[in-house]
Image: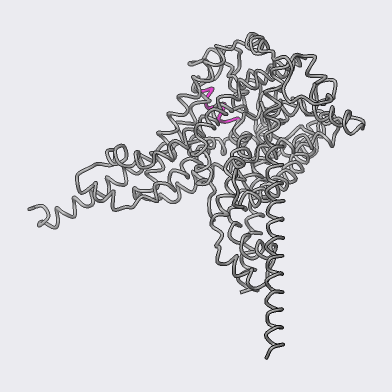
Amino acid sequence: MQPDIAADMKADSFTHKSLQNTIRRRKVINFVLIFIAFLLAIFMAFPLYWMIRCSLVSKAALSNPEFFADPPSLFPKSIQWINYAKAIKRINFPQQLLNSLSIVIPYVIANLFTTSISAYAFARIRFPLRGLWFTLVVCTMMLPNAVTLLPQYDLYARMGIVGNDAIFGGKLPLILPAFFCASGNAYFVFLLRQFFMTIPMELDEAARIDGAGYARLYFSIMLPLIKPALIVVGLFSFINSWNEFFYAIIYLQSEKVYTLTLGLYIINGIRLTNYEQVMALAVIVTTPCLLLFLVGNKYFTEGVKLTGIKG
Amino acid sequence: MAEILNTKSAQKSHSRRVLNEYLTGYLYASPAILGFLVLTLYPMAASLYYSFNKISLKGDMTWVGLDNYRRLFTDTSLGFLKSMGVTLIYAFINTFLIILFCLCVSLLLNREFRGRNLLRAIFYLPSVIPMISTAILWKLMLQNAAGGGLINQFIMKVLKKPQLDFLTDVRLVFVTLFVMGLWTCGGTIVVLLATLQDVPHELLEAVEIDGGNAWHKFLYVTYPTIKPVLFFQLIMCMITSIQVFAQSMVLSANGAPNRMTYFINIMIYDHSFKQVGLKGVAAAEAWMVFLVTLIITSVLFYFQGALKRDENGIFN
């Protein structure tokens, strides 16, 4: 009996030891992986830091930075706020800001309304060919934009909304798609429909029995319920519209109507050697997006999760 | 009450209600439906019609049949095949790198640790920045050392090696473009990270009990769960990569070096709005892009379907 027990105990302590080893090894692996994640994150964040840094140094410091000096300095020795003043003077800043806002604000408002009401119809009102229309609309988000480019341009031109002398300075073609869930906005119809589907149908029935019409149902019951999703759509469409470049370079044909994003591109194209001023402008153009992100981080990630279309 | 008792009138009111629902449905969905018809379907069809015509400066059209398409493949001065080639090479490698990178990062971030949300935010942040800013920033970082290029300063001063021409070398310029792509792929990371929450813990534990290692867990549990989403991200990434525009415009509007970054959307933009008399050709190019995208998407869908059949057929 005695040796047996001893052997058992030995085996026990052996498995115990190997278990401990496994746990320790796992902990080490876990630590290493998390370390790698942090390292990667530093690499991702670094260019942003560099953009801000370059916008604040003098021209000489740009080509010969203190960054690789011995010892390296993370922060520039002299901060040149004047870069921003000079950069703003190079472009017609107030005009371009106004142009950007005059496109973005109606774009976002129109988008919120049209995508949500269409999504509401696709999710909760029964009408013939509903599934077909929905599929077609959603498929447009996979369509390369080039294939509709020329006829769309001609269509807008025939409507008289293209060019410097047209109504609204020719900015309308950049806003119009938001009124029709077009040019990528089908994405939001899909997203909001997913959201509407999660609301129980009994709610509609109850409201209809109480005598509410579709409009009332939509405005006073549905919209408040999908507020988080609407915030997501608002944030995303702001960023999309603010960052728009492809259509901007096509439809905005004079300096009078340039947006900030387009202005930044033009300044970069002039091949001016004052890169610190270009970076200052880049920071200015980027800031609204960064601020929105910081304010709505939670909604952003929620929204991105929702768009991770399953199956 | 009398109305309800009267079945005929009740039927009438019922059908009126159904009709009302139909009409309301169409009315409320009309922005999307009209948008599809007027801003997508009509331009697509018109674009196809354009591609069979020679379009003069004034907009007069003369039917030339398939001549525009013939020119795409025979007229080397247009450079369509090269443009399509570099676009596809860029799109395939870019998509591959992005999906691989996003998958790895999302698996890393899927662990429980403090600061996880912060890291997720950091990875996502670059993707909300205007592409123009991103491209200008990376252009500065990858410039030659004298112009303020950080990477080349690092290569020269720390590694003591000759600097690399990230912006002017026909191969290295792609490195620049891939770096921009990887830097802005945060959206995919967040989507994958969210999908990884759906991976069933019990199954992961079951694999462990059966003696499986981390790779087995990924292959038999994690991957099948996230496959549909991963696949959708792959397709969307492919489609956006084929339409690469802003990055190349910032680096050089004319596709330098040696037209290696003269991507198809830049070519279509040039032929449509910058050069005279090539609108018909541009429409043909646009339709070729559409067809190529359609083929790639279908092949990808087929492969996903084939894999699914395989799973059900052989392994089950």
Describe residue B110's horizontal placement relative to residue B161 as left or right. Answer: left
Residue at screen point 62% across, 60% down = B222
Q: Return the x and y of residue B29 as percentages of the image width and height.
A: 39, 41
Question: Which of A243/A82 is in front?
Answer: A82
> Furthest-bottom residue in view?
A1
The stretch drawn in magenta includes residue A15: no
- Vertical placement of B110 versus B32: above or below? below
Residue at screen point 78% across, 41% down = B85
> Furthest-left residue in view?
B2
The stretch drawn in magenta includes residue A151: yes
Q: Is residue A204 visible?
A: yes
Q: Quadrant of residue B89?
A: top right
Question: Which of B175/B65 is in front?
Answer: B175
Q: Return the x and y of residue B104 as percentages of the image width and height.
A: 68, 50
Q: Is residue B48 visible?
A: no
Question: Which of A107/A141 is in front?
Answer: A107
Quadrant housing the C terminus of chain B:
bottom right
Q: Return the x and y of residue A132 as percentages of the image width and height.
A: 45, 50
Q: Quadrant of residue A247?
A: top right
Question: Which of A112/A181 is in front?
Answer: A112
Q: Which residues are magenta?
A: A150-158
Describe residue A77's horizontal placement relative to residue B37 as left or right. Answer: right
Q: Return the x and y of residue A158 as percentages of the image width and height.
A: 51, 23
- Vertical placement of A108 versus A278: above or below? below
> Furthest-front residue in view?
A2
Q: Quadrant of residue B159?
A: top right
